[in-house]
């Protein structure tokens, strides 16, 4: 399963009611580090398919969600389990560090 585009319209169903952990990638088109992180996030989505859901949130399109998570810098990656934030990472990180956020 590829990453899911998360919007305020599907956030509740895809993230808060997910029965598996969700990794959210807050990003923007104009963000260089976000573009560097994109293939890393794609790899995680493929490798952890079925055990982790990966969502992409464009901060320019979904400013309410970015504000709700107090995203001040991008890329920001947030891991949610059972509707609660369990880990957060800001800036580019190699795949091993991102995967470690999943616990």
Image (cartoon, grey):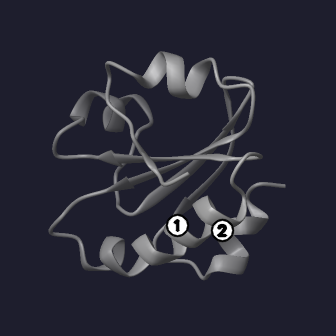
Indicate the quadrant containing the C terminus: top left, top right, bottom left or bottom right.
Answer: bottom right
Mark 2 nearby-residue class (10 Å; few <14, some 14–19, many ≥20): many
Q: Nearer the viewer, mark 1 or mark 2?
A: 1
Marks 1 and 2 sit apart, C-alpha to C-alpha, by 8 Å
Q: Nearer the viewer, residue 3 or 103?
A: 3
Helix, strand or loop for disc 2: helix
Do the residues under discs 1 and 2 have CB atoms within 8 angstroms? yes
Percent across and percent down for residue 24 are: 51, 47
Position above or below: 25 against 37: above
* Residue identifier under label 2: 98
Who's the residue at 65% across and 25% down the image? 18
Q: Is residue 35 left or right of residue 77?
A: left
**Residue extending furthest right?**
103
Q: Quadrant of residue 79?
A: top right
Q: Nearer the viewer, residue 71 or 102?
A: 102
Who's the residue at 38% across and 36% down the image? 6
Who's the residue at 59% across and 59% down the image? 45
Q: Is residue 37 left or right of residue 65?
A: right
Tell which circle, 1 or 2, labels the residue nearer the N-terminal end. Answer: 1
* Residue identifier under label 1: 41
């Amino acid at each position: 399963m590829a990453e899911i585009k998360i919007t305020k319209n599907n956030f509740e169903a895809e993230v808060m009611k997910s029965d598996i952990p969700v990794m959210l990638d807050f990003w923007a088109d104009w963000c260089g580090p976000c573009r560097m992180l994109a293939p890393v996030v794609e790899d995680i989505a493929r490798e952890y398919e079925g055990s982790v859901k990966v969502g992409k949130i464009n901060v320019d399109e979904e400013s309410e969600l970015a504000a709700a998570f107090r995203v001040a810098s991008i890329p920001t990656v947030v891991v949610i389990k059972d509707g609660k934030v369990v880990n957060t990472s800001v800036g580019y990180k190699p795949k091993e560090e991102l995967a470690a956020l999943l616990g």
